[in-house]
Amino acid sequence: MSIRPILIHPDPRLKKVCKPVPDLSDQLRVLADDMLQTMYDAPGIGLAAPQVGLLTRLIVLDCIKEEGAAPRPMAMFNPEVIASSDDLNTYEEGCLSIPEQYADVTRPAEVTVRWIDRDGNEQQEDFGGLWATCVQHEIDHLEGKLFIDYLKPLKRQMITRRMVKLKREKARA
Ligand code: NI
């Protein structure tokens, strides 16, 4: 397993619609393992393939936060929200591609997600709380959508300018 570099917004690869995974392969399983390791290392609770530069419909997540609780690493190929609650929930979101910037985003409080697991089996599960927010945030990445796209233009532009500056400083370092 290896840690992969995470792309920082703005980057054209973060704005692309990703391609479905036709068949699982060992290469894709390695990618899922690498993404989980990259996410835990960051540390973060979710990561989508475009964030490591691959335009593939794959996300990983683990929203277990309690000290000492067993981790629940999940890898989802071709994930789809197939039902959403009318109830909404607002969470302060962040993103590993937009480091240290946080903002409130309102989304359906519960979602039903269908995906293909690493063994190629179809799975379906209902998610609530932080898991619901996270899985929707990650699936958005596969559509080229970032959490800042939910914000007012002024706020979004301010965050983008900060990221441009951060990238310039990193390039110089
Ligand atoms: Ni993100």
Image (spheres, grey):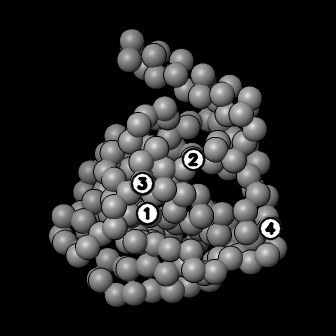
What residue occupies the far top of the structure in this picture?
172
Which quarter of the picture shows residue 12? Answer: top left
Q: Mark 3 or mark 1: which comes first in sequence? A: 3
Q: Say which residue label 2 marks.
A: 146
For discs 4 and 3, the disc positioned in front in the rendered view: 3
How much space separates mark 4 and mark 3, taking CA atoms? 25 Å
Choose between 12 and 94: the one closer to the eye. Answer: 12
Q: Residue at x 80, y 67 (%)?
A: 88
How much space separates mark 2 and mark 3, taking CA atoms? 12 Å
Locate the N terminus and report the quarter of the image it occupies: bottom left
Q: Mark 1: which amino acid? A: Ile
Q: Which SS class for mark 3?
A: loop
Q: Mark 2: which amino acid? A: Leu
Q: Say which residue label 3 marks.
A: 17
Locate the C terminus and report the quarter of the image it occupies: top left
Q: Which SS class for mark 1?
A: strand
For discs 4 and 1, the disc positioned in front in the rendered view: 4
| The label number, if any, that marks residue 88 in the structure image | 4
| The label number, if any, that marks residue 59 in the structure image | 1
Q: Mark 4: which amino acid? A: Leu
**Tag 3 and tag 1, C-beta contact below 8 Å:** no
Above or below, comparing residue 160 to residue 117 in the picture = above
